[in-house]
Image (cartoon, rainbow, N blue to C red):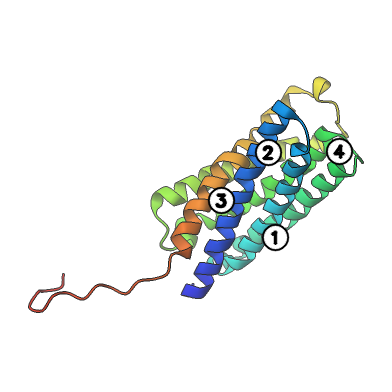
Amino acid sequence: MDDARARDAGRLALAIGVVAAGSAVCLATYFVVRGPFGTINDLGNATTGVLSAALAWRLRRRTSSRAGDVAVGAASVGAAFTVIGTALVVSDTTGFLLGGLVSTVGFAGIGAWLLAVNRREAAGAWSPRLRALGGAAGALMAVGVLTSPGILLRLDDLETAPAWIWIGFFGWLGTYVAYPAWALWMGIAEARPATPARSAPAGTAVE
């Protein structure tokens, strides 16, 4: 990836990190003081999804195999699900739970892409620790796919939701904690302009 494309990808990743972390803060604030923070959280989720699809397309050359194409497609479909989930809640078409299930499945698709892009052969010069964090975030997010039967069952009552729904909700730990951390780290690494190697002093051997 050339420097300009890398910096663009880095900026997108930084935006994802800021928006996703901000969404998590808004959700926590909503449970304490209510107000508009729930809606802001919902809109932040959709924005995170759309930015993630944009980043997946920006990095698609790193996952140019058939499996990589499938992963980018999963991120794109996942982003659409996050927008639909937000729209369902904000418009009061459904309750918080059902709309949240749709968004959870959406972020599971993004998590699948995150796993693919953090493979050794796709991640390029990223450090092993950055790849490990991305893989862990993607795996956590992908757990959210376990909530997909809840969409078909139209579950929308948190008090009567079955236990397996809560297992799927562990995916939000990836979306709200590990994914923003990876995105900020990756964004800083990619957005930093390349610097030429320092010249060695005269008479000094270059190792």
Element under label 2? Answer: helix
From the top left corner, tell me how far across and down residue 185 is, in percent. 47, 52
Residue corresponding to mark 2? 26
Label 3 CA crowd tier, 10 Å (few <14, some 14–19, many 20+): many
Image height check: is 72 above or below 44? below
The disc labelled 2 sits on which kind of residue?
Cys
Residue corresponding to mark 1? 73
Outermost residue, right side: 93
Mark 1 or mark 4, which is nearer the start of the sequence? 1
Outermost residue, left side: 203
Asked whether, in this view, residue 49 is left or right of residue 202, the answer is right
The total number of labels drawn is 4
Residue 115 numbered tag: 3
Mark 2 or mark 1, which is nearer the start of the sequence? 2
Question: What separation in Å lies between label 4 and label 1 (alpha carbons)?
Answer: 22 Å
Image height check: is 181 above or below 35? below
Outermost residue, top side: 159
Question: What separation in Å lies between label 3 and label 4 (alpha carbons)?
Answer: 26 Å
From the top left corner, tell me how far across and down residue 23 is, in percent. 67, 43
